[in-house]
Amino acid sequence: MRPILPLHATMTKSVAALLSVLLVAAACVRPEPKTPVAECVKKCSDVAASQCSSAECERGCEFILDRVVERETNQVLACVARGPRRCGDVVWAHCAVHVGVHADGGPPAPPPPSEDD
């Protein structure tokens, strides 16, 4: 009959080795952004790093929140990155209104009221 203790020691070593491998693998994984704005900031840091500081990316992504939710972040960031000006509110606003369904200025104005009314 085999003693139980060596089997327990072998299992303990195996579990410890498995935990070590899992910890190393988990440490190598880059955390993904948890919110759409955080994802926008990460993309801004990658795409427009020469134009925007990290603080400007954060402010700009909050500023264009409606475009972020409409999944137009990439188009706005491309506009910001290719612009000749620094990454201020005016640049973010300009780029936000010139992408997607908003690029043509929106729907036409309603007709003026008739004089009979």
Image: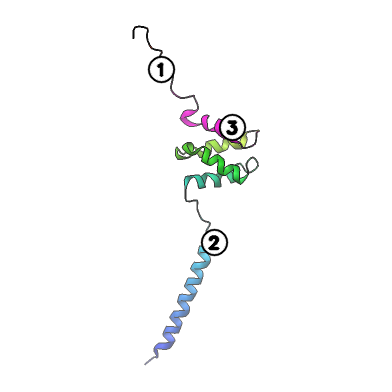
Q: Magenta stretch: residue 106 in it?
A: yes
User: Image quadrant of residue 89?
Assistant: top right
**Whether label 1 touches label 2, CB < 8 Å:** no
In the picture provided, is 8 more to the left or to the right than 87?
left
- The amino acid beneath tag 1 is Pro
Distance CA(mark 1)–CA(mark 3): 28 Å
**Whether label 3 touches label 2, CB < 8 Å:** no
Distance CA(mark 1)–CA(mark 2): 57 Å
Circle number at residue 110: 1
Upstream in sequence: badge 1 or badge 3: 3
- The amino acid beneath tag 2 is Cys
Q: Secondary structure at mark 3?
A: helix
| Magenta highlight range | 85-110
Q: Magenta stretch: residue 78 in it?
A: no
User: Image quadrant of residue 77?
Assistant: top right
Q: Please name the residue shown 45% across and 80% down the image.
A: 12
Question: Which residue bears the numbered disc 2?
Answer: 28
Residue 25 vertical position relative to residue 101 in the rendered view, above or below:
below
**Residue 51, how many percent across, how many down?**
64, 40
Q: Secondary structure at mark 2?
A: helix
Residue furthest left as drawn: 117
Circle number at residue 90: 3
Classify mark 1: residues with Cα within 10 Å, few (<14), some (14-19) or many (20+): few
Q: Secondary structure at mark 1?
A: loop
Classify mark 2: residues with Cα within 10 Å, few (<14), some (14-19) or many (20+): few
